[in-house]
Image (spheres, helix red, strand yellow):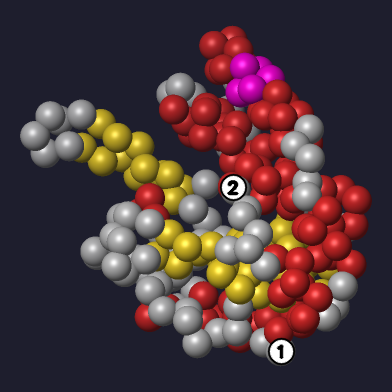
Amino acid sequence: MKQRLLTHKKTNKKLILFNVQDFEMRNPIKQYGHSIIVKQMVLNSVPKEEITGEKKFTATSRNIFQKALNDWLKLKGAYQNIKVPENLIQLLKTESKKDQEKLLDKFVLTPDVLTAFIFKAYHEFGFTLSQYTPKFSQKNVNPKYMPLAKIINCGTHWHCFFTTFNRLKREKTQLHYISSAFGVHRTDLVRHITSSESVFNLDHLPHITL
């Protein structure tokens, strides 16, 4: 995980900005846990050398790590206790675009339910997780709303959930879905999503807006 230290010009207040990094075909539970634990350690001023293992933890750093680990375990338990809607489970069992469109028709998917679904898809069905962002950010795009794509993958079958920035409502993102059943090659999809020119416009891809 990369981070940048920013200084507010007027207040001189320090701000740590964490950059979302791409990864491919990982265990999503371990990936989320590592990210959350490292972020908490950085925010609590654990030296980089101790986080990377170049130096041993001090007693203070060890306590910070243990608290971060405990917090993550509680959060993981909360995600695993979320009931994943049957529509999403059936999504993994069909290779029919028509069936997938029916399953997601007027379906509302919250971030917490999506995370719970990703965990369950890995734990029970063997779907790994990949995550992608545009290679170059637009100057007029708030990093908080940077488009992001999550692809769960099992063999040749994949399901992608990606966000786009709403040009009319400047502070609103939209969630979309596309899968291997939609006739788009995964490599082409990733290339398109990670292109800086696609930050605002992915409309020409076949997809479902949730």
The reply to whether dot 1 and dot 2 touch (C-beta < 8 Å) is no
97 left or right of 192? Answer: right
Please tell me whether the stretch drawn in magenta is mainly helix, strand or loop. Answer: helix
Q: Is any part of residue 24 visible from this angle?
A: no
The answer to which quarter of the image holds residue 181 is bottom right
> Image height check: is 55 above or below 151?
above
Residue for point 60% across, 32% down: 37
Which residue is the site of mark 1? 183
Whether residue 68 is in magenta: the answer is yes
Residue 61 position, x and y percent, is 56, 17
- Magenta range: 66-71
Residue for point 47% across, 81% down: 203
Residue for point 15% across, 30% down: 12
Whether residue 166 is in magenta: the answer is no
139 left or right of 147? Answer: left
Residue 126 position, x and y percent, is 88, 58
Q: Which mark is residue 162?
A: none
Q: Secondary structure at mark 1?
A: loop
Please, what is the three-letter code of the amino acid marked with disc 1? Gly
Q: Which mark is residue 111?
A: 2
Q: Earlier in the sequence, mark 1 or mark 2?
A: 2
Residue 179 position, x and y percent, is 71, 75
- Real-space Cα separation, disc 1 to disc 2, in angstroms: 26 Å
Which residue is at the front of the view, 24 or 166?
166
Which residue is at the front of the view, 159 or 129?
159
Q: Is any part of residue 108 visible from this angle?
A: yes
Residue for point 72% across, 74% down: 101
Q: Secondary structure at mark 2?
A: helix
